[in-house]
Amino acid sequence: MMKPDLNSPLPQSPQLQAFGSRSSDLATEDLFLKKLEAISQTAPNETVKNEFLNKEIPSINKLFTRFLKNRKKVIDWDKINPPPADMVLNYKDLPAITEQRTSELASKLAVLKLNGGLGTTMGCTGPKSVIEVRSEKTFLDLSVQQIKEMNERYNIKVPLVLMNSFNTHQETGKIIQKYKYSDVKIHSFNQSRFPRILKDNLMPVPDKLFGSDSEWYPPGHGDVFFALQNSGLLETLINEGKEYLFISNVDNLGAVVDFNILEAMDKNKVEYIMEVTNKTRADVKGGTLIQYEGKAKLLEIAQVPSSKVEEFKSIKKFKIFNTNNIWVNLKAMDRILKQNLLDDMDIIINPKVADGKNIIQLEIAAGAAIEFFNNARGVNVPRSRFLPVKSTSDLFIVQSNLYSLEKGVLVMNKNRPFTTVPLVKLGDNFKKVSDYQARIKGIPDILELDQLTVSGDITFGPNMVLKGTVIIVANHGSRIDIPEGSEFENKVVSGNLHCGAL
Amino acid sequence: MTDTATSKATVERPKLQSTGSLHSLFKNVDLFSENDEELYPPLQHGARFAAPIEDSTLLALGMKPDELKAFQKQRHAYINKDQIYTDEIKIPNKTEMVDYHQLHLVSPIDQSNASRLLNKLVVIKLNGGLGNSMGCKTAKSTMEIAPGVTFLDMAVAHIEQINQDYNVDVPLVIMNSYKTHNETNKVIEKYKTHKVSIKTFQQSMFPKMYKDTLNLVPKPNTPMNPKEWYPPGSGDIFRSLQRSGLIDEFLAAGKEYIFISNVENLGSIIDLQVLNHIHLQKIEFGLEVTNRINTDSTGGILMSYKDKLHLLELSQVKPEKLKIFKDFKLWNTNNIWVNLKSVSNLIKEDKLDLDWIVNYPLENHKAMVQLETPAGMGIQNFKNSVAIFVPRDRYRPIKSTSQLLVAQSNIFQFDHGQVKLNSKREGQDVPLVKLGEEFSTVSDYEKRFKSIPDLLELDHLTVSGDVYFGSRITLKGTVIIVANHGERVDIPDGVVLENKVLSGTLRILDH
């Protein structure tokens, strides 16, 4: 996943400023290209080599060239405005849709899940989409089930498209075998694989085409447009009569097909819809929709000048943030791609340390495409359409009795006295999914929980109940085994308690 | 506790007195040697040669004539204690006992006779104790064993139920000590409207003596100091009852039997089967004994001594001799059925000589002597005595907070003044509960339990250290909870512990 850095060294880096002149950039471009060509020489065969030379190198080089050209360009803060009222539609104001109309629209729809992530922050080594999130069902299982239910209900055939990365492609290909008989047609394609770039000299990290995966990266979900075109799937979908594509993160459990949004899109000839939702204090770093030079634009925190970061995080000025649920008109996408307009999508520079080296990744958000579509809109949706699982704390929430699973869709428990989701912070000991599962014998009842903080070596017994604000702290070197059936309401729990079987 | 002499006394032989008998001289000589076969420790030197106390001195202290007489007799018996020799102690023969479950065969009940039988009965509850070992300072009978229900409430409810069911008039008599008398008389006001006739009487008051000299602690012509006196045990009931005039009153009213029991024994309810047996077999004295279990450590066992039933208090036995009794399984419940006329006759004939036990409490670092008599000792005095082997459910004493926890839990249900085992519990056993010293007083116990845990499926609970229980806790199987020394364990609300060892520290604070 894209990980914007608050203190991007670009363009402030003194070393980078040394490349002030265009002639220096040209030299860098040439050297970069030569390096890529050298990498192609390590291809195992002529076919792979030619594929890399003819298709991949142009894409990589194009992005790199754009990066060099624009890296000193700073967004003009004075031109940034919150979106005007007509740019963002309110979900609750969308017109109701009839059953018949739903069937018509559904036959024009394809669903795409962004499935390139590994979930490494949760200690996973395989595709994130195969984490079991609920009743032994994975993210992918739930996506397939939702579409299957929809297809049966409206007697249609909405296909599921999976965008994999080189990290997830092979394993996902095996996994989808189990959906063979599910009546859901599943397409998959790979997004691009780009070389990581050394920060100090802006040269590609890898020497070989298939040396080490850690020297390459998928360039963000903005790559979906190019990759979909390159794979031939875009043409296939259009030929099958599909007009709309609903794109979302596979780990967003709230991203289900919503025909009210699709209806608004179709009726108003909207080419692109970005779903946004209201910011809470937990979302202050999320990308926001703005108006810039008269057009809709996605603004990521990584693009914000240092002096303006606090203003960016203000909930008062920037009230909404991007859910990465995106609806796109396929014909418009095809037109824009052919006109090469998407070549100018904003680049997010993501610095990292990999294998002990300082590197950068050039990434593009899918939301960055919004400014190139005619009549693009945001839709302010309820929080229920944004249920990301990015950590075991999020996993804890979606696995609890706060939600129930209905036809592949998570529905909030009606008995919860509030509409908000509790704030859950599980400590480092719970960070990995395997540790989380080992430490929690049964998900507690959190129907009336406001906030939970857990720190240290803690294990949870089954059938617990947590209400209000609960803080559980085991001191360093201590361990707390919370006994079965414990109930805590507005409590701070600390100590060193062992509960072993007799 | 027993204080074994550290060395043999060395004294000059007493001069022959014109008033002393030859027999007395020989007896004194015997006391110089310690016989290994003896069960009880020998008296200390001072006690062996204690001077007699003048009756006039006791009168001056305010003792009543019959109290005075009983005290003198007991003091004398203490000085001249007959030794019991271990080789004559036996486990009682079955023929000397009757099994509760055989009563319906030995003495079948004529149900049409039930009311007539019950109308011959008087129930006496022994209510002299304060429950000191549980940190109580008021009468133990006023302790709550269920929300809003005391021991006394249970007794009244039970007898009222019997009186209503059989249309009879079984009176409840409460024997108080000077410690409980005033309080109890206030408490029983609330039973005015109940269909139970309640009478109270006070047992005797004996002066404490100094252990080393057997001199009296109270001084003549000084105000009465309660700390210098003590109630002389449940065996005092017979003489006190006579002195109160209640025996004659009950005999005149056609009462023939009294059923005596401890107020804190929840299992001691009127049993028609036993009463019928006492009646038909013309039993003068019936003592209920039950199977001894591990937790029965203080109290008495039934034995046979010189081929006669005898009650032995374990607290009196030399420590090295206690192992002799590990196979003696008949435990005194202190549930006693006595023929009222027999009591009256024995007292009048001055033949009611109960054996005694001795306690040595410390007051101001000085050892005292208290001579007490258990009522069960009467089994040796009455002609036609019998021991009745009863099931464990007739002996449910509450002598500790551990037992209080079990009684207050869902193991038991209260029904018309009776305690019954919850039918949902599998098996007839009661869980073994050992609460640590932090729970020993009732006030500490109540502070540490926010509510009584569900013990329906508990076998064994041990709690040690500074532990606090939340509400709605369930304990099953074997549960051991240990708080580290100096640390505290808060058991959270709603916890279920089944076959668990919980140890360490856990604090739960309000947020």
Image (tube, rainbow, N blue to C red):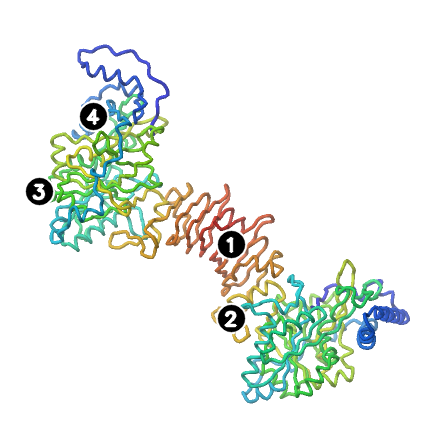
Q: Residues within 10 Å of mark 2 (few under 14, many from 20)?
A: some
Q: CA distance from mark 3 to mark 1?
A: 67 Å
Left or right of residue B349, residue A464 in this image: right
Q: Which residue is the site of mark 1? A: A482
Tag 2 secondary structure: strand
Asked if badges 2 and 4 are on one and the same chain, I answer: no
Q: Chain of mark 4?
A: B
Instruction: Give whichever of A256, B457 is nearer the camera.
Output: B457
Query: Residue beneath label 3, please?
Result: B252
Image mark 1: chain: A
The x, y position of residue A493, in whole percent, is 52, 53
Quadrant hosting residue A139:
bottom right
- Label 3 and label 4: CA atoms lie apart by 31 Å
Q: Residue at x 70, y 81 (%)?
A: A233
Which residue bears the numbered disc 4? B72
Residue count near mark 4 (Cα–Cα under 10 Å), binned few <14, some 14–19, many ≥20: some
Dot placed on the residue nearer the N-terminal end, 3 or 4:
4
Looking at the rendered image, the disc whose residue lies closer to the viewer, 4 or 1, is: 1
* Tag count: 4
Where is mark 2, residue-wise? A404
- Local packing at callout 3 (Cα closer than 10 Å; few below 14, some 14-19, many 20+) is few
Residue at the image point whose x is 28% and y is 36% from the top: B301
- The three-letter code of the residue at mark 3 reads Ala
The CA distance from mark 1 to mark 2 is 25 Å
Query: Looking at numbered disc 4 in the image, what kind of residue is underneath it?
Result: Gln
Determine if marks 2 and 3 fall on one subunit. no
Whichever of labels 1 and 2 marks the residue nearer the N terminus, that label is: 2
* Above or below: residue B73 compared with residue A295: above
On whether disc 4 and disc 1 are found on a single subunit, the reply is no
In this view, the residue in front, B381 or A458, is B381
